[in-house]
Image (cartoon, rainbow, N blue to C red):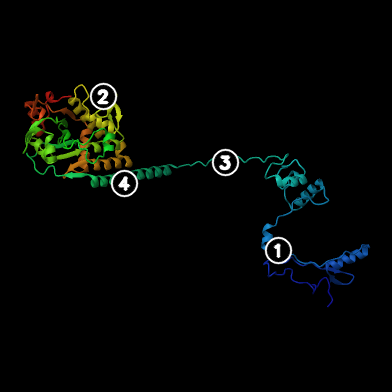
Amino acid sequence: MVATPDQPSSDKKDSQKKDTNSGQYAAPQQPEFWDSTSNSWVPPAARNKKQQENSGEQPKRQGPRHARRISKDSLAQARPYRGPLPGVDDQQQAKRIRRVQQSRGVQTGPGGRPGTPQRYKLPPSEVYRQRGAAEKAPVEGLYQPTQKPKKAPPTIKLTPGGIFRTVVILALTFVLLVVVGGLAGLITFGTNVSRVDALSEHMIGRTAGTNWLLVGSDSRSGMDSKKRESLGVGGDLGSQRTDVIMLMHIPHVGGQKVLVSIPRDSYVYIPGYGNDKINAAYAYGGPELLVKTFEQAAGVHVNHYMEIDFAGFAAMTDAIGGVTICPSSPINDPLADLNVDAGCQKADGKTALGYVRTRQTPRADLDRVEHQREFLSNFADEAINARTLLSPIKFFKLTNSAGKALTLDKNSHFFSLGRLAWAMSSDHVTTTLPIGELVDNESGAVVMWNDDTATFWRAIASGDEIPDYLISE
């Protein structure tokens, strides 16, 4: 068969040949050329040989040509050669690069780099030679690349609708936290609070309003020596007596709210034990006998009973972040571990406990009961403050410590305590029970009740306003 330029060569083979070993394709075979002399297709080697014979050059020895196999590893490690061409000076090389790039339609800048300004002062060959040390030290003469300007942080633009949604979400989240904290506090309080059957047997029937008998005991039970030393309350006294006795009278509708301090040395009749100090009733028969003794002596019905000891008093004070006290003069009482200056100040649990216990003042017991009423009112005001009620953590701490510190009658609950705290934080009368003369008898130094005392208790029982002359500062 005679080959012509219009006919394909019968010797042509596939341009690509699969290499089954490396997974890559071999390089394409060299194309054939048409030889008009022999009227046939000839390979490049024969064509070159014929041209050399016509020019008189010595034919070069052609070795066997093999397609180079490229493995995956060598392909991954391959790098294009960017060095200077052999036998070409720098200017010729720069012109060649520029000419090639322009032929490909690439916009070039000075130095032949596509679309970029000239960055180097050194010749390209010198730059290539020093490129290996560029990572360790900058090449002298190189221009430093310009830093890109920092982008301004994105601004958040809220539409009126977006602002409203954000406010609503934050408000709902806050309300949810308050509700969850409140429920957790109520559950904790109900679980920890102690109950006592203090109102099982009354001496008299119901009287006007709601009356709370508030008792602070001097019990050290449950406190180890380290705790007693930290609070400055001394050692265990053995018998437990009431260090503080108060009555909070809350009228049903309108009327006068009264917080009255009852001297613990009041000489009264204790059912089953005869005449003695009123605080001895607690030592003889606990809360139930104390309530019965008070009701018989005062003629006032007790609706609720609340008791707190030394440790619980300090814990509740610390739970709300302290309570404000306002001593009129400096107090230094080593027995109560108290040393405070005159003027209003924030007291922690230990300081507040010493403040309501100390007698190292000009009026001794009279100042003591006044300090107790002052502290109790300030504590109630802080307990129902928005800073406490709307703070889930603070409210939980208060309810948790109150549950562990308080002892209530079986009919009292958390909402009863809330009404008590509200009454103490609002406008109310604070006074000490009017008493008669001081005497010494078989019970020691006691205070006697007189006609003014009876008139005071009758006003409480009937819900009438207390006469001004019976109210003491």
Residue named by callout 2: 331
> Which residue reaches farthest right?
56
Residue named by callout 3: 151
Q: CA distance from mark 3 to mark 4?
A: 43 Å
Describe the element under mark 3 as helix, strand or loop: loop
Describe the element under mark 4 as helix, strand or loop: helix
Describe the element under mark 2 as helix, strand or loop: strand
256 on left or right of 352:
left
CB under 8 Å between callouts 4 and 1? no
Residue 180 numbered mark, or none: 4
Front: mark 1 or 3: 1
Q: Between 402 and 334, which is closer to the camera in this rendering?
A: 334
Front: mark 1 or 2: 2
Image quadrant holding the C terminus, namely: top left
Circle 1 Cα neighbour tier, 10 Å, few/some/many (<14 / 14–19 / ≥20): some
Mark nearer the N terminus (1 vs 2): 1
Residue named by callout 1: 70
Q: Amino acid at mark 1?
A: Ile
List x then y, in percent, for residue 268. 8, 32
Q: Look at the image and tell me whether residue 384 can be seen.
A: no
Describe the element under mark 1 as helix, strand or loop: loop
Q: CA distance from mark 4 to mark 1?
A: 70 Å
Image quadrant holding the N terminus, namely: bottom right
Circle 3 Cα neighbour tier, 10 Å, few/some/many (<14 / 14–19 / ≥20): few
Residue sitting at x 10%, y 44%: 200
CB under 8 Å between callouts 1 and 3? no
Q: Amino acid at mark 4?
A: Val
